[in-house]
Image (cartoon, coloured by chain):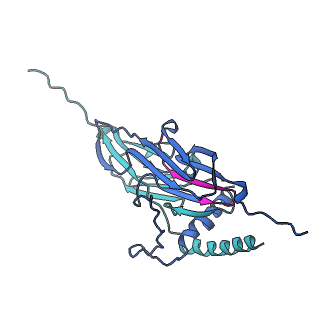
Chain colours: A blue, B cyan
Amino acid sequence: MFGSLWSSFDTNLFDEFRRPKGDVDPVTGRTAWPAGIRALRRGTFPPVNVGSTPDQVDVYLFAPGLDPKGIDLSIQQNLLTISGGRRIGADADADYYRRERFEGDFRRVISLPDDVDPDRVEAKYRDGVLRISVKRREAARPRQIEVK
Amino acid sequence: MTDHQDFATRENVGTEARSQEDEVVLRPAVDIFEDADGITVQADLPGVSRDRLNIQADRNALLIEAEAAIDMPPGMEALYADVHSTRYARSFVLSGELDAGRIEANLKDGVLTLRIPKRLEFRPRRIEVSAG
């Protein structure tokens, strides 16, 4: 089961990203993703992937260690807003060598394609990944036309 | 029909890309702290379940390797991606007073916590000063 999931992830989400589209980042040599007007600086917590199929749009937030009850999700037309916070709670008696993990509040606003249906949204939090699936409107899906 | 051909082409490209770019490995963010009894390592590994986690430790080194399993509908295309890989790896050099044989690991909501205890003889002892 994992094999097929991995391959679908690998051959779609990642290849799409690697496909040369002109703008190449001078530092990494990677194809630069055209920055959305609401996009945050790379490296901002939590990282986000957005994938699409003809039926739905899926948003993945890589946000480990959250309390699912503390995640605030809202959608207005095609604008999805996710906010929340992560509390790590430093050990006062310990000596820290590295503190790389994000602590604090976050908020991300993601514009989805125009044809998503804001009434049909599902969100699930598993193993530190928040997955939000938004169905597309029926009328917008490609339809087979029968020739009579 | 066109859809199917498109997908097949993409799959071929994918195989090539995988062999060339097999090295795309994510370096998880960590917190490391020490108290009197040992060292604690916490690592962010979103998408990783217990069976996709591999921790190796010997006297000298600690290696954390993991793979994220992400549920996705078939035929998904990326609209945007911050994360380009599902593989994580990070390693650290250990020092001799740590007892690599007694490491405890706990994984919850994509956060790995490793507790590496110090050998008993290296734990600080409180020395009582008796009044003379």
Q: Quadrant of residue A147?
A: bottom right
- Residue B110 in picture, x, y percent from top left: 51, 46
Q: Is residue A148 left or right of residue A18?
A: right
Q: Nearer the viewer, residue B74 or A22?
A: A22
- Residue A72 in picture, x, y percent from top left: 50, 41
Q: Residue at x 61, y 76 (%)?
A: B16
Q: Quadrant of residue B129?
A: top left
Q: Nearer the viewer, residue B124 or A132?
A: A132
Q: Is residue B118 visible?
A: no
Quadrant holding the N terminus of chain A: bottom right
Quadrant holding the C terminus of chain A: bottom right
Q: Is residue A116 visible?
A: yes
Furthest-right residue in this view: A148
Q: Residue at x 42, y 74 (%)?
A: A25
Q: Residue at x 62, y 45 (%)?
A: A122
Q: Point out the stretch of residues depicted in magenta.
A: A51-66
Furthest-bottom residue in this view: A22
Q: Is residue A56 magenta?
A: yes
